[in-house]
Image (cartoon, coloured by chain):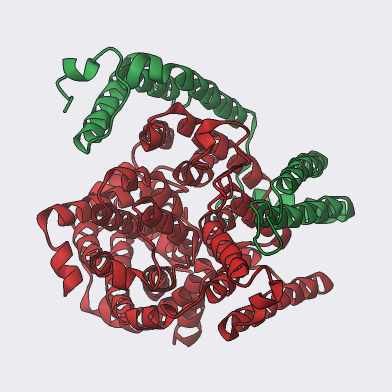
Chain colours: A green, B red
Amino acid sequence: MKLIQVNGERILAVIMLLFTGNLLASSIRYKFFIDETTPGAGLFPGIITSVLVFLITLWLISTFRAPTQIVENEVKLDSESSNLFEEMQIIDEDGKKRIKYVLAWSLALFILLERVGVILGITLYVTGLLFSVSKIKIWKSFPIALAITIFFSWGAIKIGVQLPDPFNLFRLLRIDS
Amino acid sequence: MLGFGHILTPSIILYAVLGCALGMITGVLPGFGPAAATGLLLPLAFVLEPTQSIVMLASIYYGSMYGGTITSVLLNVPGEASSVATCIDGYQMTKKGQAGKALAIAAIGSFIGGTIAMIGLVFSSKLADLAISFTFLDMFGFSLLALTLVVGLTGDSMIKGLISAFLGLFIGMVGLDIYTGGPRFTMGLPELTDGISFIAVIMGIFGLSEILESIGGKKQPDFSGNIGSVLLKWRDFKDSFGAIMRGTGIGFFFGLVPGSPAAACSFTSYTIEKRISKTPERFGKGAIQGVAGPETANNALGISNFIPLITLGIPSSATMAILLGAFTINGLTPGPTLFTNNPEIAWGLIASLGLSNVILLVMSLPLVRVWISILRIPTMTLYAITLAFMTIGAYVISGSMFTVLTLWVSGLIGFVLRRYKFPMAPAALTLVLGAMLEKSFRTALQINYGDFGSLFSSTRANVAYALIVLIIGSKIVTAVRRKMNPKTQSSAQKSLNDTEEVRS
């Protein structure tokens, strides 16, 4: 596990280094100075991205220099103190599955929300989450989701928010403004 | 009196009550601290009028602090770093059937601490009078100092904290350049010409990433016990009074220093109470002073945190950075000019904190069983509902799915970075500070014909630079000392030892 963690840090550092390097190149294109006295659009981003490149490089170097014992101790600290605010929770295989369900459902919502509207879209979304993550049966989760969605929508409309409703369900439910 | 006259209207009071209630509900969600709670409900700043949104968000912030206390005391799950100290004795009181007492003293201590701190806040307008004479050079120096103080929020890894801070600075630069009007880093997307939505990013990195982490982690405990009576005896008041007064002083002064860790404040209060107590052996086993002191300090810090924000325009914590964003969304500029240009907002904010203080006391004790009932709802169900709420909230900001996409991308990036121990608080702070920093930097340079040496021509700015060198130097020295002497413990390890000792 510790090797995966260290390798993960190295991969992340390399990705971030490539990304910020690209940003630094863009900053140069925006010009650091418009004329001799006027700072250009690229000056401040140039300074920020340069510092970022420097910091990420330091971080990458530290991942190669850190002894594995220190990494082991950090992992041990994580697993023993998972109730402390600062420490990260251990995510097991079930946990990863739950996160994947959430991301998959959220992608579906992202595609559907404007096409089917808030009432249907959010109801289906919450139903799916309650079923897959909370293990609540559909015949229970659907009415709960519908009630919550109508409540939130009513509240949002009351304070003047416009929500997508291609099928005019707000009017049907008499909650439109 | 201008502020109270502006605030004491039925609609504003209603928003304050609603804000406290929403804050407590979100604060009760395990893992949700004031920053996440305020960030989650930030879209409200977009749809309400300035006074309404500022009052509501301040009340949400206030309410969420007490919501975090509830989970700390009942479940031994701190809502945020500063609640860890409350867990130590608060949870022990719950085990002894005295949860109601612990929650009551936390509420009363918070009220007293908040009221006294508010008096200090009232006098902070004098600081604004001084700050109004600041030039662009001075603002640049102090913005840079605030950025450096972010180093205090970096946790155990300074490099990762600084990377997080500079990433936040970069995100703030996406969009149209303020001087040339040309697009920067927009990748040709018209949606990015107005910049990346601050609200969506904050909701993502604090709220969404926290939910993803909690969904993936082990099951959070539900609370099914009885809290006992919330009525305190005279002896409980007498025993706690000293702790409350000392906590108020500690919290107030910690809050004045931008970047000072809130956890350090509450632990300082706890440590002092334990040291001066005639019966220190009671601490860790349910001593009421162990709850009264840290909770009062926490609340007093929460109020005094507003002082650097409204007088200098410098946020001293992630939550203050979020509130600064709310000011900006409403076209307001917190800082020395707020008292002159928008006195009704400045004094209204101060008055709303006083109002929220009273409302919280009224709502927290009699209705504590209502808030606790939220804990009986399965956590995953609460998270599912919160995700839906966040998605609607993100959509409301711009009426487009692009902001929802921003929310989810920020959330995923925040989740990944947090897994690799990147703190998110520095990013939130610099996301807001970045615009101010760039503006003061470029304006100062332009006024002085591009002369970089002019950045050192102001005495006040030089004082700020000297403080910066001092802060960075002390941080480096501490890090080097820690490496050379492995026996030196970090604060996380110390608190781990404390809680391990309590649990055994």
* Visible residue check, residue B20: yes
Q: Which residue sits at x=86%, y=53%?
A: A61
Q: Residue B384 lies in what quarter of the image?
A: top left
Residue A63, given in percent of the width and then of the height, sits at 83, 51
Residue B280, given in percent of the width and then of the height, sits at 48, 81
A48 relative to B316 in the view: left or right: right
B290 relative to B56 in the view: left or right: right
Q: Nearer the viewer, residue B482 or B223?
A: B482
In this view, the residue farthest toward the top is A167
Q: Is residue A152 above or below residue B496?
A: above
Q: Which residue sits at x=45%, y=83%?
A: B279
Which quadrant does the C terminus of chain B fall into? bottom right
Which quadrant does the N terminus of chain B fall into? bottom left
Q: Nearer the viewer, residue A102 or A21?
A: A21
B371 relative to B400 in the view: left or right: left
* Visible residue check, residue B70: no
Q: Residue B308 lies in what quarter of the image?
A: bottom left
In this view, the residue farthest toward the left is B10
In this view, the residue farthest toward the front is A35
Q: Which residue sits at x=75%, y=71%?
A: B479
Residue B86, given in percent of the width and then of the height, sits at 44, 65
Residue B118, given in percent of the width and then of the height, sits at 30, 75
Q: How many marks?
A: 0
